[in-house]
Image (cartoon, coloured by chain):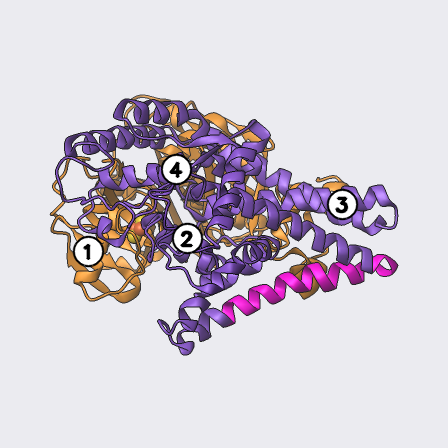
Amino acid sequence: MPSPSTTSLRRPPRRLLRSRLARALTTPHGVDGFLGLVDPLLATDDVRARVTRVRHQSADTVTLTLTPNANWTGFRSGQFVNVTVEVDGRRHTRCFSPAGPEQSGELELTVKAKPDGIVSRHLHDSARVGTVVTLSQALGDFTLPRPRPRRLLLVCGGSGITPLMSMLRTLEAERYDGAVTFLQYACTSADVLYRDELTSLAARGAFDVRTALTRETDAPEADLEGFFCRDHLNAVAPDHADAETYVCGPTPLMDALAAVWAEDGIGERLHAESFVPTRALVAPDADASAGTVTFAASGIAVDAGGATLLELAEGAGLEPASGCRMGICHTCTRDKTSGTVRNIVTGSVSDRECEAVQLCVNQPVGDVVVDL
Amino acid sequence: MTATVDKTSEATHAGLSAADVEAFGAEMDAIRDRVLADLGSRDADYIRRIVTLQRRLEVLGRSLLFAGFIPPAWLGGVAALSLSKILDNMEIGHNVMHGQYDWMGDPALDSRTFEWDTTCPAEGWRHSHNYVHHTFTNVVGKDRDVGYGVLRMSEDQPWRPLWLGNPVYALLLATFFQWGVALHDLETDRVAAGEKSLSELAEPGRVAARKAGRQALKDYVLFPLLTGPAAPLTLAGNGAANLARNLWAFTIIFCGHFPDGVEMFDEATLEAETRGQWYVRQVLGSANIEGGRVFHVLSGNLSHQIEHHLFPDLPAHRYAEIAAEVRDACRRYGLPYNTGRLGRQFGSVVRRIVRLALPRRRARHAGPEQTR
Ligand code: FES
């Protein structure tokens, strides 16, 4: 339980802080510009959260408990949040699905550190009790319908377990009395997540919990071995045609399920969520002329053709603001939503999602989306 | 006439060969690339420390003024508030709006949305300063910072009897600098000269009026009223803080481009100007002020005006670190590196303002000021 003093900090007198008087007194920086002096968690509208617990379930994952400020409006199981962290001075945003029950006021994130994942590595290596992160409200419609279906099949692989774990815990908290089969794919027994909790849920007979190991044989706890196939399905849920199925995990797992469900003509009963980036990373020396630049707000797409983003935009008949056209005045700065760009002055390449780029000195490398 | 160098002639751009100019440019680019590649948490921590200091000073200053009837409290309040406004405008606002911290991706430090504690709206400033002044530095007729449209700062501005008031105008501009900057951005002088229509002024005028209104409401109505019986003292205190900031900003800014030895250019300079030539013009058109660490911070590091003009979007606290290298390069290429203590630099600015109040005296040839 948070102590009374933190509670009062988390619940500032919002009416007052949002009043016109408060705004007039704090212009031009706004109330938020000063609240941070008291507590980095305080904000009039932004959702921020403090890490209140850190544990490691396996060597390459970290499970964080986050206590959000009063602006957090909660989530439904299966939804995700955008988590923004600062790594070496730069903000990065990634989405994660909370794994806790939706009845909880906290968020539990289980993050797998990917070798080249800036955010996941940072959370894995550096998140401490007290670390503050910025959140979005919950997003996404990968959620259980109401009323709840009577038969559910939940399939997950790797860190894709989190939205399904959340569903399972929510159902448990609701005293759901339908039938649930929960099938987790992990590489080896050391990679199985939420093992103790799943075992105790299974022991109480509430849910049918199964584990499949893809890279280990003869492990006592494995119900299945190898990658998903129809045999696995027949073994754990021969009645899958009567179930609503939710799957989250690596692309091959999701593709394999989709194929079986399509074969059976029940594709609409399969609900999938993927966090694996579908965009292939582009090598820094890739041909700048290959690719499409999309100006999202204008609904225009053009071939990259070796020009700067500013030239491309102007060539497409757009008139973005510009000034020096040599990279010093920042008049032309816009948000790049996705894709890789190369700065023609410095030669540096950047593939951050949602970053501000100067149109006049950046060339697309592959497909790029600009908010223009 | 003042000596105008034909910049198409091979041999003489500031006495440098075309090859030397580009070699100098390449050295500057190398410094820039090195610093850009090194940006990280050190820079983020620095600017956040300054922002926190500024916000604390503002809270302190405004709080002390509630006890303004006690003379030391009033003085302390004015001092804290003056420092707050100076930091806000110079080391934070000016530099953030240059895009020096855009790479962080922090919305509170985003050049596109930042607003500062002065009457001039950030929107207009970004155009007139970042683009016009920094691209066309010291090009008479293009760079509107030459005299801010109200002073005669160059022999190239033809003398009219009106200029007899030059020193008086300078005094008025220094006193009401925040209003001067706001009007300067609206280009009211160009409207008076018939170069711009009154209707073009409508929208920016409305923006400026709204911003000015908010600033005046806060400093001259709301905070005085809140302090009750001390209202007149608070009003005077806020006015004094604004005045202190105005005088300081005027002093620093005028020392950046108008001490003796700083060169002015004509519009021909801009034709087909190379990146190297642009760098050279920035060096010739700027002057530094020597001083200690605190002085540099309070000047927004505009005391490193030369470095700032070479690299307007590098975090300003880096200028001190690269100054020795820039100075050494200038020495090797035979470029002047104009620097001196505040008293000397400002003294020569004052002499120029007074001298240019009068028409050119025939007998004197080539004064300290030259035009290229
Ligand atoms: S137009 Fe000046 S930075 Fe791009």
| Residue at left offset 37%, top offset 57% | B157
Foreground tag (3 vs 1): 3
How far, Cα to Cα, is label 3 from label 2?
35 Å
- Tag 1, which chain? A
Q: Write down the residue under mark 1.
A: A311
Quarter containing the C terminus of chain B: top left
Q: Can residue A18 be seen in this view?
A: no
Foreground tag (3 vs 2): 2
Query: Which stretch appears magenta?
Result: B206-231
| Residue at left offset 40%, top offset 68% | B190
Chain letter for purple?
B
The first of marks 4 and 2 along the sequence is 2
Question: Does A19 appear in magenta?
Answer: no
- In the image, taking residue B166 as reference, residue B247 lies left or right, namely right
Q: Which amino acid does label 3 sit on?
A: Gly
Please name the color used to draw chain A.
Answer: orange
- Tag 4, which chain? B
**Residue B254 x %, y %:** 49, 45
How far, Cα to Cα, is label 3 from label 1?
51 Å
- In the image, taking residue B282 as reference, residue B6 lies left or right, namely left
